[in-house]
Amino acid sequence: MRKEPAKREIKQERAARTRVEIMEAAITLFARRGILATTMAELAKAIRMTPGALYWHFPTKEDLLLAAIEELHGRYMAGFQDVLSEQRKQPARVQLRTFMELTQHFLRHHREYGIFFGMVSAESAENNDRVAEAIREKLGIYVAAAENIIRYGQNKTKEFRLDVDAKQAAHSIIGGFIGAVLHQNLFRESVTYDATLTTLERLLVEGTVTR
């Protein structure tokens, strides 16, 4: 009686690993070619899988994109929860710098993730409302986190300028990181990632500090 549940569990684990492998390959391919230029047939070929097997895991390209967005969100948040919870008692400037350094670190090791978000954001805004809404939801969480830190610095610690709109500044921070990754990728032969992101961090943080 124990063999059947064990076999089922093994199959489920194998299927879960396969889904992650598919999403990883898809993220890389979408980051390189975009949504419209990437077909499910090309993806199946890239991961050495039959189209039928790919469609079994993800019936449509939209399903695959939504799953990939959710997967990346989970990976991004996993590296933030503990650190940010510990930072809440720190000055707002320290919190904001930590938030940005963590984002920089994440994108340093996974630049294709930032490029993926940039490419999918640009294309889905005009071509796929469901995917665009999923992107907005996830990016909105990051924006809200940055906005809360800025408001804390404005209203509680008095570190940040009151003439800076907290929400717009937060959007600038998140959009700036994604844009910087895309821009550096284009100029990768002459512009380094760390120098670009460090400069962006300095401009955004120092620009909000009271004088």
Image (tube, helix red, strand yellow):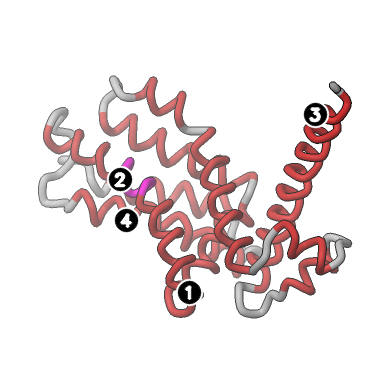
Instruction: Please indicate whether residue 141 sits to the left or right of residue 130 in the image.
Output: left
Q: Of the two numbered discs 2 and 3 on the same chain, state the one appearing first in sequence.
A: 3
CA distance for labels 4 and 2: 9 Å
Depth check, mark 4 against mark 3: the one in front is 3
Magenta residues, dominant SS class: helix
Kindly identify the residue that appears in the image at 85 percent across and 21 percent down. 2
Q: Amino acid at mark 2?
A: Ala
Q: Amino acid at mark 3?
A: Pro
Q: Is residue 144 above or below residue 30?
A: above
The residue carrying mark 1 is 128
What span is in magenta? 141-146
Q: Of the two numbered discs 4 and 2 on the same chain, state the one appearing first in sequence.
A: 2
Q: Of the two numbered discs 1 and 4 on the same chain, state the one appearing first in sequence.
A: 1
Instruction: Tell me residue 191's x, y (percent).
Output: 58, 61
Instruction: Please indicate whether residue 40 sits to the left or right of residue 139 in the image.
Output: right
Q: Looking at the figure, which quarter contains the N terminus?
A: top right
Q: Amino acid at mark 1?
A: Asn
Residue 158 among those drawn in magenta: no
Q: Is residue 160 above or below residue 163?
A: above
Kindly identify the residue that appears in the image at 52 percent across and 46 percent down. 73
Depth check, mark 2 against mark 3: the one in front is 3
Q: Label 4: how many residues lie within 10 Å, few (<14), some (14-19) or many (20+)? A: some
Q: Looking at the figure, which quarter contains the C terminus?
A: top left
The residue carrying mark 3 is 5
